[in-house]
Amino acid sequence: MVGYDKADDAAVYKITDEIALIQTVDFFPPVLDDPYQFGQVAAANALSDVYAMGGTPKLAMNLLCFPHEKMAAEDAAEILRGGADKVREAGAVICGGHTISDPEPKYGLCVTGFAHPDRILTNSAAQSGDLLVLTKPLGSGILSTAAKAGMISRAQHQAMADIMAALNAAAARVMARFPVHACTDVTGFGLAGHAAEMARGSGKAIRLFSRELPLMDGALGMAREGIVPGGARRNQAHLADSLSITGKIPGALLDILFDPQTSGGLLISLPAENAAALLAGLIPHCPHARIVGEVLPEGPHPIIIS
């Protein structure tokens, strides 16, 4: 039902008229120093793709690259424990996995989920007139970079880790009650990059409201100081020909739009008349959720930033 032709979050295979299988895989090097927290974040990030497709994760398999000569076995165990706890929280089961020796640690999951074939969501069915709701705040790439230099407070660091480790499960349950047209999760390409994928796949344009973005504590200040990861610059360069910027947008806000996220929120496209009700349903579970954009008819630029 869904392959790799439109850069969707996961593959989908119809098994019966009632059951579709959702398959995804994701892993990466540590974004946090604490191995348990890293395991939680990496697992939440992998599970998120199933939620973005409208599904429920059920099975997960570990992927662990482990520098056994430089890394304590206890740290590897903590990574796996963090991942297992997050999978258990999702109501899914770790059913195996694979470990290899590698100079740099990496961890993630291959996840299998299920959904009714009629309820599968993709990132390529947004419709003109839709509003876009984002369920998590932005800035994890910027804050992770600042944390490596010891430039953020312990409270800011913990808040960032908690947001990245939070499952998108509650957001997906609320979303399922509404006539959602398209959905994706915001990860390495940043909000602008994933919105561009949605716009191109849907044959539309998307306007992002730069001054409505939910932000992690400290992210804007770090961006103003020029603490921006290289991935944000690459994302911006990749989208250079696809962008139209209207008005005077502060440079720090532009940096946040391109900031690569780890285990970011869901970006949900739905009819404008349903957006306020969706937001009201999300806020008790996702207090940072905001309306961050709108879908327009196709134009010369897939992404408009205002």
Image (cartoon, rainbow, N blue to C red):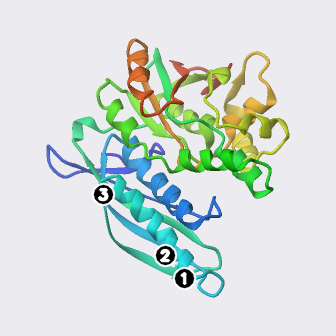
> Residue shown at 42%/29% (left/top)?
284
Percent across and percent down for residue 95 are 31, 70
The residue singled out by tag 2 in the image is 77
In the image, residue 46 above or below residue 52: below
Percent across and percent down for residue 155 are 66, 46
Quadrant containing the N terminus in the rendered view: top left
Q: Are marks 2 and 1 in contact (CB under 8 Å)?
A: yes
**Residue furthest front in the image:** 155
Percent across and percent down for residue 133 are 49, 26
Q: Nearer the viewer, mark 3 or mark 1?
A: 1
204 or 134, which is in the foreground?
A: 134
> Residue shown at 44%/22% (left/top)?
279
26 or 58, which is in the foreground?
A: 58
- SS at mark 1? helix
The residue singled out by tag 3 in the image is 92
In the image, residue 240 above or below residue 146: above
Question: Circle 2: is it few (<14), some (14-19), or many (20+) Cα within 10 Å?
Answer: some
Question: Circle 3: is it few (<14), some (14-19), or many (20+) Cα within 10 Å?
Answer: many
Among the two numbered marks 3 and 2 on one chain, the one whose residue lies closer to the N terminus:
2
Quadrant containing the C terminus in the rendered view: top right
Whole-angstrom CA distance, mark 2 to mark 1, is 6 Å
Q: Are marks 3 and 2 in contact (CB under 8 Å)?
A: no
Among the two numbered marks 3 and 1 on one chain, the one whose residue lies closer to the N terminus:
1
Using the image, tell me which numbered label, if any, was put on residue 73.
1
33 left or right of 206 in image: right
